[in-house]
Amino acid sequence: MNHLEQYLSVSPEVRAALDAGKPVVALESTIISHGMPYPKNVETALHVEEIIRAHGATPATIAIIQGKMTVGCTREQIEYLGKRGLDVPKASRRDLPVLLARGMDGATTVTTTMIAASLAGIRVFATGGIGGVHRGAETTMDISADLEELAQTPVLVICAGCKSILDIGLTLEYLETKGVPVLGYKTKEMPAFYTTHSGFQVDYKMDSPEDVAAAFKAKLACGLKGGMLLTNPIPDQYAMDLDYINENIDAAIVECNTLGIKGKNITPFLLDKIQKLTGGKSLEANIQLVYNNVAVGAEVAKALCKE
Ligand code: PSU
Ligand code: MN
């Protein structure tokens, strides 16, 4: 019989931090291979790790490398994932068995990063944006596996809300049905990735990292399955003009439909198209909001480690 150790590799640094009860923040790799162009993707991924360290926590970038869920990628592995870009298969829950069995590489989405983090014993994961219910899902049924993962895997995910490539209202309805708490970091309004305004409210406004940690501890103590979503608004100085970004998102969706892009290629296509249409302005905002999220992630991880 095959065992988990065959498919899961935790770096010595991450293992030591977890064994000592120290804070660890998980990071995904689809954002590296599919979410940003090279070399900005690698620069961002490495700087994200520095920010987490500067806040006194240990970063754990997660990817599938040669058939192993690798928790705590090396600098060389991050460079490899960034350079190979779209040639690294995007790995969601359904892709895991075959990629692992065949010894392949995979860029982990929010879904698979949560799975690997949870298997390694990591409770906190910070990223840019999550997947959700796509606009038009009432006919396409395009709903990201990220939402189901939040419903079943006990990891706290910090993001800047979801992009309006998604139907934010339906995404919130789905999370409500699945019992996933949607929290706002120092805000009552759900942020919409590039902007702080979405017109939707979160369930609860969180006032501090300790406030978030206390809620997550209560959830774990009661054995309530699934994760929690902490939405953290992009800092004001980096936020984009609402009308400007929405016009570009609309144009990207029209092109996606015209070209007949389907399935797992939809999200990467839209992210890339929006970056091109905005001449890189959205990429800069994207990078800054990730930096902001990982800093909050480190503080929440620290708060969770306190008695
Ligand atoms: N949204 C973003 N940036 C991203 C993603 C989503 O703003 O990089 C990535 C994440 O890895 C997320 C995945 O888990 O896309 C969702 O893909 P899909 O919609 O195909 O489930
Ligand atoms: Mn999809």
Image: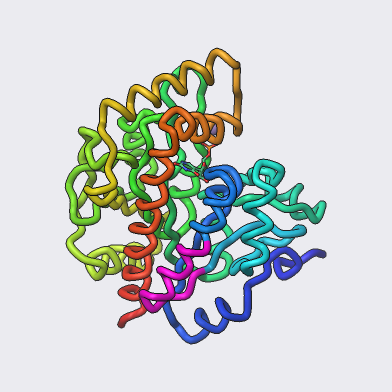
State the colouring used for the structure image: rainbow
Q: Position of residue 96 (x, y in %)?
A: 68, 50
The residue drawn where x is 52% and y is 34% is: 272
Spot the residue most to the top.
258
The residue stretch that appears in magenta: 46-59
Q: Name the magenta segment's main secondary structure.
A: helix
Residue 206 in the image: above or below residue 213: above
Q: Position of residue 88 (x, y in %)?
A: 69, 46
The residue drawn where x is 65% and y is 64% is: 70
Q: Toward the viewer: 191 or 269? A: 269
Q: Position of residue 94 (x, y in %)?
A: 65, 43
Q: Toward the viewer: 182 or 109? A: 109
Check residue 54 for magenta coloring: yes
Judged left or right of residue 77, residue 197 is left
The residue drawn where x is 53% and y is 68% is: 60
Q: Quadrant of residue 34?
A: top right
Check residue 98 for magenta coloring: no
Count of labels shown? 0
- Name the image quarter holding the C terminus: bottom left
Residue 290 in the image: above or below residue 119: above
Q: Toward the viewer: 175 or 37? A: 37
Residue 152 in the image: above or below residue 169: below
Q: Quadrant of residue 56?
A: bottom left
Q: Quadrant of residue 172?
A: top left
- Name the image quarter holding the N terminus: bottom right
Residue 274 in the image: above or below residue 115: above
Spot the residue most to the front.
279
Judged left or right of residue 271, residue 301 is left
Q: Position of residue 128 (x, y in %)?
A: 42, 49
